[in-house]
Image (cartoon, helix red, strand yellow):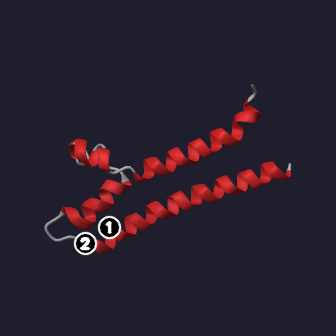
């Protein structure tokens, strides 16, 4: 088995893994709530903390970080689609 035959499967696995990593919230929040001195804070936990974690929540910055997560996932998805089209044409 050669790597060119595994490329489509590997690419979609990496893309889905990246999207899941960007959105993972529950495990980090339950285990560490962002960790000691924010060591395990991700964009998802940061967004939650901005929106709901303080006594005076600031929904605007929390929503902005959430939108940033969506844009990052969208960019990687579009890069994946472009690479797949380029390989299909070749």
- Image: 1 above or below 11: above
**Mark 1 = which residue?**
62
Residue 78, image x and y in percent? Answer: 64, 59
Residue 27 location, quadrant: top left
Q: Going by the image, does 47 lie left or right of 81?
A: left
Q: Nearer the viewer, residue 39 or 32?
A: 32
Check disc 1 and report its element: helix, strand or loop: helix
Q: Going by the image, does 82 lie left or right of 43?
A: right
- Image: 38 above or below 1: below
* Residue appearing at x 57%, y 48% in the figure: 15
* Residue appearing at x 33%, y 51% in the figure: 25
| Residue at the limit of the structure toward the top, as seen here | 1
Check disc 2 and report its element: helix, strand or loop: loop
Q: Nearer the viewer, residue 57 or 89?
A: 89
Q: Nearer the viewer, residue 79 or 4?
A: 4
Residue 46, image x and y in percent? Answer: 31, 57
Residue 14, image x and y in percent? Answer: 57, 43
Q: CA distance from mark 1 to mark 2?
A: 7 Å
* Residue appearing at x 58%, y 55% in the figure: 76
Q: Going by the image, does 10 lie left or right of 47?
A: right
Mark 1, other Cα within 10 Å: few <14 / some 14–19 / many ≥20:
many
Q: Are marks 1 and 2 in contact (CB under 8 Å)?
A: yes
* Quadrant into which the N terminus falls: top right
The total of numbered circles placed on residues is 2
Residue 32 in view (yes/no): no
Residue 36 location, quadrant: top left
Mark 2, other Cα within 10 Å: few <14 / some 14–19 / many ≥20:
some
Residue 87, image x and y in percent? Answer: 79, 48
Say the numbered circle drawn on residue 58.
Answer: 2
């Amino acid at each position: 088995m050669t790597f060119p035959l595994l490329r489509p499967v590997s690419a979609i696995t990496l893309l889905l893994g990246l999207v899941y990593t960007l959105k993972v919230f529950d495990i980090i929040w339950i285990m560490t709530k962002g960790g000691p001195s924010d060591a395990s804070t991700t964009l998802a936990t940061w967004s939650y903390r901005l929106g709901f974690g303080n006594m005076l929540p600031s929904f605007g910055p929390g929503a902005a970080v959430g939108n940033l997560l969506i844009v990052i996932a969208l960019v990687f998805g579009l890069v994946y689609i472009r690479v797949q089209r380029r390989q299909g044409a070749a």
